[in-house]
Amino acid sequence: MVMMDKIKSLAEMIENSKMTVVLTGAGMSTESGLRDFRSKNGWWNRINPLELATVDKMYSNYKLFHEFYSFRMKDLKKYRPHRGYEIISRWEKLGLIYSVVTQNVDGFHIEAGNKRAYELHGNLCDVRCMDCGNHETAASFIDGKSCVKCGDRLRPGVVLFGESLSGEAWNSALGDIKKAELVIVIGTSLQVYPAAELPRLTKGQKVYINRDVAECNGNFDLVIEGSAMEILIETDKILKKHSLT
Ligand code: OAD
Ligand code: ZN
């Protein structure tokens, strides 16, 4: 199938599904300007995550840990959710999709206006104290300040390697995925568990959108190779023609 035919199929699947869930990864944000993790320019191709994104390293090498996460917090402020995010937000308002499950920590789905967006890996700027859990601002973390309540060090609200996901986000995601008639997976390498498990847990149809589909394992009903933002824009145009959006 050529690309436009695949996009037409996707639009039809969305029109016919009564419960659609979108699952996103870092590839959803590269067109906003952020790096992903495992592509050529991805973070984990420049730095070994086991050197700084683990619970052990947070305690044993706080200097490097702090440098990395404060860089990412400052960097994030330069970027905004792109048009693809706006489309996903509008689709939720219109009832074309039910919810978004994301592995991203940039908060872009919520910033774009999605109400049901489950952030499986937390939110970078949701800073808290390592010890007492007191919430502080991203600016306090970036400035290297300590917790105002207990004096311990601050950390970002991301799930580190070695930590479990927020039960609430996971349960919401799993509940929706199980009920879904359609799951649209956008811009993730599906290499990190348990998020990678989610597409296998739906009884619905599954679509995989990625600019590089070489490693897609083939369990998808539809695979579309290309830019996340462009595919969303083109799909939205078709839905608009059918005056669904
Ligand atoms: P990865 O970097 O592993 O995968 C991103 C995927 O998106 C790759 O398969 C790219 O080919 C694809 N991609 C990149 N840009 C794209 C674009 N513009 N359009 C379409 N596809 C594009 O990122 P994740 O799968 O999200 O954990 O990684 C999962 C987790 O690993 C992350 O949440 C992060 C990391 O450790 C935490 O931050 C806790
Ligand atoms: Zn504290």
Image (cartoon, rainbow, N blue to C red):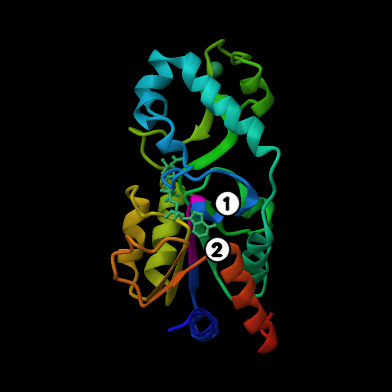
Amino acid on which the number 2 mark rests in the picture = Ala
Question: Quick check: 218 above or below 138?
Answer: below
Q: Is residue 23 magenta?
A: yes
Front-most of 92 and 243? 243
Front-most of 19 and 195? 195
Helix, strand or loop under label 2: helix
The percent coordinates of residue 53 (x first, y second) are: 41, 29
Q: Is residue 20 visible?
A: yes
At label 1, counting other C-alpha atoms closer than 10 Å, the crowd grade (few under 14, some 14-19, many 20 or more) is: many
In the picture, which quadrant includes the N terminus? bottom left
The percent coordinates of residue 24 (x first, y second) are: 49, 57
In the picture, which quadrant includes the C terminus? bottom right
- Choose top left, top right, bottom left or bottom right for residue 84: bottom right
Q: Is mark 1 within 8 Å of ligand 1?
A: no
Indicate left or right for 28 with 179 as reference: right
The percent coordinates of residue 107 (x first, y second) are: 60, 46
At label 2, counting other C-alpha atoms closer than 10 Å, the crowd grade (few under 14, some 14-19, many 20 or more) is: many
Indicate left or right for 134 with 140 as reference: left
Q: For the residues marked 1 and 2, what is the alpha-carbon distance in whole angstroms?
A: 9 Å
Residue under numbered circle 1:
29
- Disc 1 or 2, which lies upstream in sequence? 1
Q: Which residues are the magenta region? A: 22-26
Residue sitting at 34 percent across and 55 percent down? 196
Front-most of 198 and 186? 186
Residue under numbered circle 2:
228
Q: Is mark 2 within 8 Å of ligand 1?
A: yes
